[in-house]
Image: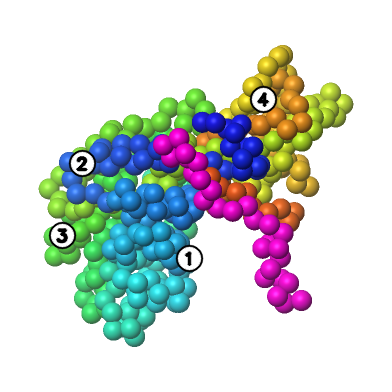
Amino acid sequence: MQFEALAQQYKTPLYVYDFDGITSQYEALKNAFKARKSLICYAVKANSNLSVIRHLAQLGSGCDCVSIGEVKRALKAGVPPYKIIFSGVGKRDEEIKEALECGILMLNLESEAEMYRVETIATSLGEVARISIRVNPNIDPKTHPYISTGLHENKFGVDLDTAKRLYIHAKHSAALDPVGIHFHIGSQITELEPFYEAAKVVSDLVRNLKALDIELKFFDVGGGLGIKYSEEETINPYNYAQVILNTLKGLDVTLVCEPGRFLVGNCGYFLTRVLYEKTNAGKRFVVVDGAMNDLIRPSLYQAYHHVELLDGKGEETPADIVGPVCESGDFFAKNIMLPLTQHNDVLVIHSAGAYGFTMSSNYNTRGRAAEVAVEAGQSRLIRVREDFETMIALEEACL
Ligand code: LLP
């Protein structure tokens, strides 16, 4: 990747995405599931740039969305409604109404109260809502507590007994059509066991429901496949698919999976330029033009992202890589070995394709970074750098 040339052409801070890499990730997962009907629904929250969604849609991907905004993004990018799933613990009435009107594949329900809202809204629209229920299988995914979602102590989904009760209600409702079942136990999972255990518990429930004459068509295993940020061992997509498919013997269901990070995480790079070097009583800091408002994962989760200094030469000494934001938590890396840098040197922060730009903000009135796609050796802008006028427009209108 020609990082120096990209930084020159599009300026920094900058997100760069390798679209060919995204294609390879998608194909690897799709092939792993080829023994069965499957639908990959890309988790838009990981990277919701319209061009990224469009690229995946052209490969055949659907989308997993967690707001009506994400549903509309998916539609705008060219994803057909019958490949869109709408999940999330707190959907507003308006969001439910719009989703039903769009005719999406299914709404993932996360509570009994939500089921009644959806039923009421569907009835008033004269529609039948296709639904799936998110089961909380109480499995520890062994990941960071903030991104663990499949334990009863987490707010997500309903327990197995409640799920069964909801399916029985839905089966007898004129406004609900129970078509699927869903679980998602967490993110950045690097062990197979939790996936197997969750799929086992939930597939047993599907068999149970079948005995009650409730035939589900979609078995949605959520996302969560981890990627390599550093030295961690990750799961091979083939093995992942095998453990899940093994739990589905005898069931005629389409496998749905909602990867976010796996598809885009390692295909994204954040480019930032060095502003200054400084030392405080011997402690070395490299101050760069990107900040926590651009990429918050290191500050929020103490997440590791590999930092590469382009053309770095000479003796390496420990340094913290920090941004201009007025917080000590504004860092990309701590105590990493780095040669002495010069003003304008480019640093590449790796594995920034997932939960990078989408979690960015205007904190400190910093405009959001530009985004660029690289495909077959060609680069193109896929999001214009946010300028000051755009940032203040909604307030200025109210002055
Ligand atoms: N499906 C559901 C229902 C989800 O809640 C999520 C992610 C996914 C799929 C996609 O998970 P993935 O395949 O990307 O692991 N901001 C955090 C990650 C939050 C994940 C939230 N849910 C981070 O930067 O690590």
Question: Disc 1 on helix, strand or loop?
Answer: helix
- Picture disc at residue 210: 3
Callout 1 environment at 10 Å: few (<14), some (14 to 19), or many (20+)?
Answer: few
Whether residues under marks 1 and 4 lie with C-beta atoms below 8 angstroms apart, the answer is no
Q: Residue at x 65, y 42 (%)?
A: 11
Marks 3, 2: nearer the viewer: 2
The residue beneath circle 1 is 69
- Picture disc at residue 336: 4
Q: Is residue 330 above or below residue 362?
A: above
The residue beneath circle 2 is 34
Q: Residue at x 44, y 72 (%)?
A: 95
Residue 391, x across and y down, in percent:
68, 62
Question: Disc 3 on helix, strand or loop?
Answer: helix
Front-most of residues 194 and 324: 324
Q: Which comes sooner in the sequence, label 3 or label 2?
A: 2
Residue 32, x across and y down, in percent:
26, 37
Question: Can residue 18 be seen in the rendering of this structure?
Answer: no
Whether residues under marks 3 and 2 lie with C-beta atoms below 8 angstroms apart, the answer is no
- Determine whether, in the image, residue 29 is placed left or right of residue 342: left
Residue 23, x across and y down, in percent:
36, 40
Question: Can residue 76 be seen in the rendering of this structure?
Answer: yes
Residue type at tag 2? Lys
- Determine whether, in the image, residue 216 is placed left or right of residue 144: left
- Distance, label 3 to label 2, CA atoms, is 24 Å
